[in-house]
Amino acid sequence: MDEKRIKKNLNFKRLAESRMNKVLQSLNNLSKLSNRQNYEYNQIEVKQIINTLKTEVNNIEKQFKIHSKEKIFKFNERKQ
């Protein structure tokens, strides 16, 4: 069991590093669009990009929280 968990964690780390490096490179490329000498854009367009990125990061965070929650029932302690 322990060996299986170690293997799964190593696989997670390998894939996460690879995928994060791709994301970081894509974000770097996206940031190059901010160069006004090469591109024309308005603040509405910028806001759409930023909002989309924020939404996707929030969705990823929710996915990790969903998969890590243990469901435990517990009575609320109330004085009667």
Image: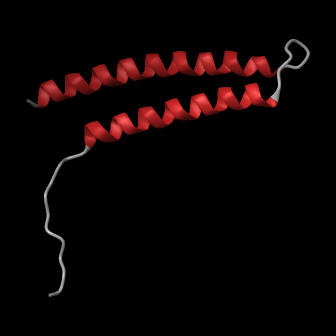
Q: Quadrant of residue 44?
A: top right
Toward the right, the furthest residue is 37
Say which of 48 and 57 sits in front: 48
Please say if 17 is above or below 62: above
Residue found at x 71% / y 32%: 47
Please state the horizontal and vertical placement of residue 24, each as a whole percent of the image.
Answer: 58, 22
Q: Which of 69 and 25 is in front in this view?
A: 69
**In the rendered view of the protein, which quadrant contains the C terminus?**
bottom left
State left or right for residue 23 relative to residue 77: right
- Front residue (pair 30, 79): 79
**Residue found 14% across the figure and 24% down from its top:** 4
Residue 25: give x, y in percent of width and height.
60, 16
At 12% from the left and 31% from the top, the residue drawn is 2
Which color scheme does this rendered protein use?
secondary structure
Q: Residue at x 27, y 36 (%)?
A: 67
Image quarter for residue 29? Answer: top right
